Image (cartoon, coloured by chain):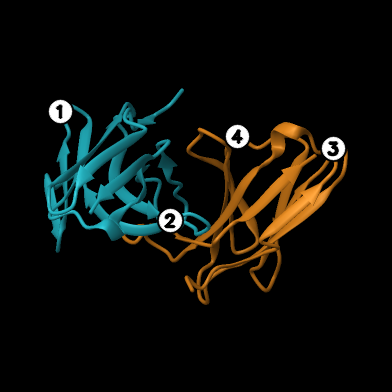
């Protein structure tokens, strides 16, 4: 157990629908990152939050949004889903400083049918 | 634009031999590099890192080498074990300060260690 909890582990939904992925960071970590891993793609950075505030944005579609709540958990909302959104979505958290990189959750596998 | 490139999608080695995984980067602002290992159905886990002020970092069977002039790093695993079979991701970051940094990942290399 890495200490980063992602739910649900698997999600199957239809095109056009909206889903919410949830992430609880490791205790004490203030930063949360969301990454997408599609087939044959590396880990694509989507967005970072630090202590409730958005800090960095990557290749995140306008149909996607995220937030970090006062208890530091984060949610990634995906709407108007398309077949191409099928992927593994990882959440990671980190402490201040970068010497140890991120701690990843086990991911949510989203399948859009 | 792929700033971190792992040009070998897969690598197969015999148990006990050396595994060498390569990574190239294009962004000269990157100054900290990490390797992650990922097993199926799990998230990536941190393996080893290196700062740009060093050219080598060793941790047990794992050694990372950094060649800044060539913008190239490599991960050596000696000796390789079947349990090392996994996808290995190279990642890089630049010094944006404090809590605000992001890692840029390569596409990964699938290492298979054959008994």
Instruction: Measure the alpha-carbon separation of dots 1 and 3.
Output: 47 Å
Crowding near the residue tagged with mark 2, few <14, some 14–19, many ≥20 C-alpha atoms within 10 Å: some
Judging by the rendered image, the residue that carries numbered circle 1 is B69
Percent x, y for residue A112?
77, 41
Q: Which mark is residue B49?
A: none
Q: Which chain is orange?
A: A
Question: Is the residue B69 above or below the residue B15 in the image?
Answer: above
Within 10 Å of disc 1 (Cα), the crowding (few <14, some 14-19, many 20+) is: few
Q: How many marks?
A: 4
Discs 2 and 1 lie in a common subunit:
yes
Mark 2 vs mark 1, CA separation in Å:
32 Å
From the viewer's perspective, is residue A78 above or below residue A25?
Answer: above
Can you identify the residue that label 2 sits on?
B39
Chain depicted in cyan: B
Work out how far the residue at label 2 is from the one at label 3, CA to CA, in angstroms.
29 Å
Percent position of residue B51, x then y: 22, 49
For the residues carrying marks 2 and 4, which lies nearer the camera in this image? 2
Can you identify the residue that label 3 sits on? A15
* Labels 2, 1: front one: 2
Residue linked to disc 4: A59
Q: Are marks 1 and 3 in contact (CB under 8 Å)?
A: no
Chain at tag 4: A
Give the CA separation, mark 4 to mark 1. 29 Å
Residue B98, given in percent of the width and then of the height, sits at 41, 57
Q: Nearer the viewer, residue A29 or A24?
A: A24
Contact (CB < 8 A) between labels 2 and 1?
no
């Amino acid at each position: 157990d890495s200490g980063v909890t992602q739910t649900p582990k698997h999600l199957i939904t239809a095109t056009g629908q909206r889903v919410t992925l949830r992430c609880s960071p490791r205790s004490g970590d203030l930063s949360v990152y969301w990454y997408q891993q599609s087939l044959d793609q590396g880990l694509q950075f989507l967005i970072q939050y630090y202590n409730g505030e958005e800090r960095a944005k990557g290749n995140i579609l306008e149909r996607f949004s995220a937030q970090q709540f006062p208890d530091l958990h984060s949610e990634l909302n995906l709407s108007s889903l398309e077949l191409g959104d099928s992927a593994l979505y990882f959440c990671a958290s980190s402490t201040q400083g970068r010497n140890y990189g991120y701690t990843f959750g086990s991911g949510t596998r989203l399948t859009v049918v | 634009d792929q700033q971190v490139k792992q040009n070998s999608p897969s690598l197969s080695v015999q148990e006990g031999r050396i595994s060498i995984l390569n990574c190239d980067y294009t962004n000269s602002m990157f100054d900290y590099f990490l390797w992650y290992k990922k097993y199926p159905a799990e998230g990536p886990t941190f393996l080893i890192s290196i700062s740009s002020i060093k050219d080598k970092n060793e941790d047990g069977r794992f050694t990372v080498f950094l060649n800044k002039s060539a913008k190239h790093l490599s991960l050596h695993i000696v000796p390789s074990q079947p349990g090392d079979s996994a996808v290995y991701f190279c990642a890089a970051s630049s010094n944006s300060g404090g809590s605000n940094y992001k890692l840029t990942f390569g596409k990964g290399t699938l290492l298979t260690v054959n008994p």
